[in-house]
Structure formats: C-alpha cells, structure tokens
Image (cartoon, rainbow, N blue to C red):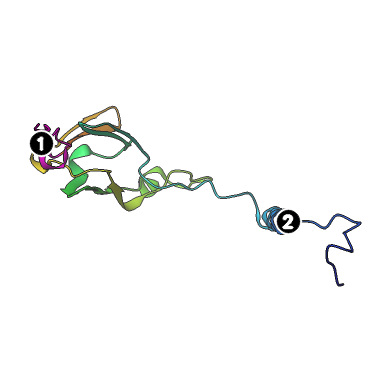
Amino acid sequence: MFRNWMFPRTTRQPSLFSEMDRIYNEVENLVGKRSTAREFPPVAVWANGEGAVVIVEIPGIVPGEVDLSVAGNLLTLRGERKSRDKTLGAQSRLERTSGAFSRTLELPFQIEAGKVAARSENGLLAISLPRAEADKPHRIAIQG
C-alpha cells in the first residue's frame, strides 16, 4: 500500500525489532531455553596503569597442568579438565564439562613477560601481569 506524509498510518505496524523478538521467542519455546554455555574457564580481569590481575576459575584442575603464555598484550591459558565419568559409573545428569580448553585474553597494554607471576589457591588461579616499562606513559618536561 502506498504511504507518504499525506496518508499517515492509522494502525500501528510492529517494528522490525519487535517482530524479530516475537519470532525468536517462538523458536526459543519450540527448541528450549537459551543456552547458558559460557567460555571456560571463567575469568575476572582488573587493570590499571601499572598492570593487570586476572583471576581464573579452574576447580578440579591441577594448577601445574595449566599452560600459561604471554606474548605482547595477549595472555593464553591452555589445559584440560579430565573426565571422571568412567570411575563414577552410570550418570543421570552431567553439568560439569570436561576436555581441553584454550582461552586468550587481550589486555589494553603490553605485558612485562619476565615479571608475570601466578599463584593457585582453592581452585582459583591469580595471575599478576605488570605493564611493560616501554608501554607506560612518560611525562615530558616542556622547556622554555
């Protein structure tokens, strides 16, 4: 139907976004709820001008079996959560995932690789990542 400024709409048409939401909700109801999957291992990152601290949740994983590497401003974690399914017998529900994982985090600055420290306690891995001296801002004195 031809519409312009002379023929305003008299009935409200659904917007594209509301129509997409309606379709998405219908599909969600047919297929099931949204996936709650998230990246593993979960992390928390705090950064300031001096560096960053990354806390990684690795319950049930031996800290020595986690491989950490730093290159430029990237921190990479690799490891494997081994399955206990065979030792426990039959299962009726499995919410704990197993298998190899790899996660790379990009920080907003270069990391001083030689000064990175990592400590593990109670399933949490704390990684201290100092900012590279060359990447820190330097104050410049103005002559005159």
- Tell me which amino acid carries mark 2: Glu
Q: Relative to 88, is 118 on the left or the right?
A: left
Residue 6 location in percent, x, y?
Answer: 88, 63
Q: Is residue 6 above or below residue 94?
A: below
Please give the name of the residue rendered at 71% of the width and 59% of the height, measured from the top-left corner.
Answer: 16
Residue closest to the far front: 144
Instruction: Look at the image and say whether residue 43 sits in the magenta stretch.
Output: no
Q: Which mark is residue 115?
A: 1
Instruction: Look at the image and say whether residue 133 sits in the magenta stretch.
Output: yes
Q: Secondary structure at mark 2?
A: helix
- Tell me which amino acid carries mark 1: Lys
Q: Secondary structure at mark 1?
A: helix
Q: Quadrant of residue 125?
A: top left
Q: Is residue 55 above or below residue 26?
A: above
Q: Quadrant of residue 43?
A: top left
Residue 118 location in percent, x, y?
Answer: 18, 34
Which of the two residues, 3 or 16, is positioned nearer the viewer here? 3
Q: Relative to 108, is 137 on the left or the right?
A: left
The quadrant of the image that shows the C terminus is top left
Q: Earlier in the sequence, mark 2 or mark 1?
A: 2
Please give the name of the residue rendered at 43% of the width and 46% of the height, measured from the top-left corner.
Answer: 89
The residue tagged 2 is 26
Q: For the residues marked 2 and 1, what is the alpha-carbon distance in whole angstroms?
A: 52 Å
Q: Which residues are magenta?
A: 132-144
Residue 94 location in percent, x, y?
Answer: 48, 46
Residue 116 location in percent, x, y?
Answer: 14, 37
The quadrant of the image that shows the N terminus is bottom right
